Amino acid sequence: PQIFAIDVNTIQGKTASFGMNNQETFVNNLSVDSNGNGLYKRINKNRTLTVYLIKNLLEGEISINELDKYLDTMEVVNAPNFSTHNLVVDKNGNIYVVEPGRGNIKNKKQESPYFVMTNFSLIDYNNGKKYNDNGFDRYEKVNTELKKAKKINVKDAFKILEKVKQDCEWKTEFSMVYSQKNKTIYYCYNSKLFVFIRGIRL
């Protein structure tokens, strides 16, 4: 399938950090606080790495329609020296969150009009853990903005992302918005330039 993805350098070489394919499956691989579980183990027929989950979903080797069954039978662990969690969204707006060593979340489209994820464990948070770091301030701000909005277009989405961009050590260098209506990916570098990605019409 046609793929749009942003790669990062890892021990396994360049791997996709987030992206989308022309089946309208979106995936990402975000840093998350570690609880000591879900650490790297050698892969086998019943175990895979987060980076391979992202790669195989983007390339269509794992069907989004079979993801429920896949996650029921496959242990997902972190790549060496990483602690990450994954967001997977299908073309209908159904969402999966994979948190190695913690578990998985499935959020069907009809359960909520939006879903926000940053760099803390959503499973731990839903189980009562209190956070004030790991992106929790950005999580709260986006939730507040989305609650106020009745309808969001591409420009509105970028305005919200602008409000939560990071200017610290982990500077926000790239942002993207997908328009399901237009079947088009839009992106900006350094939160300065709003660009249409020509040819990426899914």
Image (cartoon, helix red, strand yellow):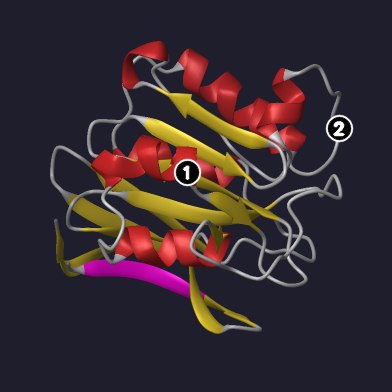
Task: Write down the residue under mark 2.
Answer: 132
Residue span colored magenta: 3-7
Where does the N terminus fall, quadrant-wise? bottom left
Identity of the residue drawn at 18% across and 52% down? 23
Q: Is residue 191 left or right of residue 179?
A: right
Q: Is residue 158 visible?
A: no
Marks counted in the figure total: 2
Residue placed under numbered mark 1 in the picture: 73
Callout 1: helix, strand or loop?
Answer: helix
The main secondary structure of the magenta stretch is: strand
Front label number (2 vs 1): 1
Quarter residue 65 falls in: top left
Q: Tell me what residue is drawn at x 46 percent, y 59 percent.
A: 53
Looking at the rendered structure, which numbered label has been put on residue 101? Answer: none
Q: Where's residue 87, x and y in %?
A: 49, 44
Label 2 element class = loop
Q: Is residue 149 visible?
A: yes
Percent position (x, y) of residue 77?
65, 57
Label 2 is placed on what type of residue?
Asn
User: Is 63 above or below relative to 191?
Assistant: above
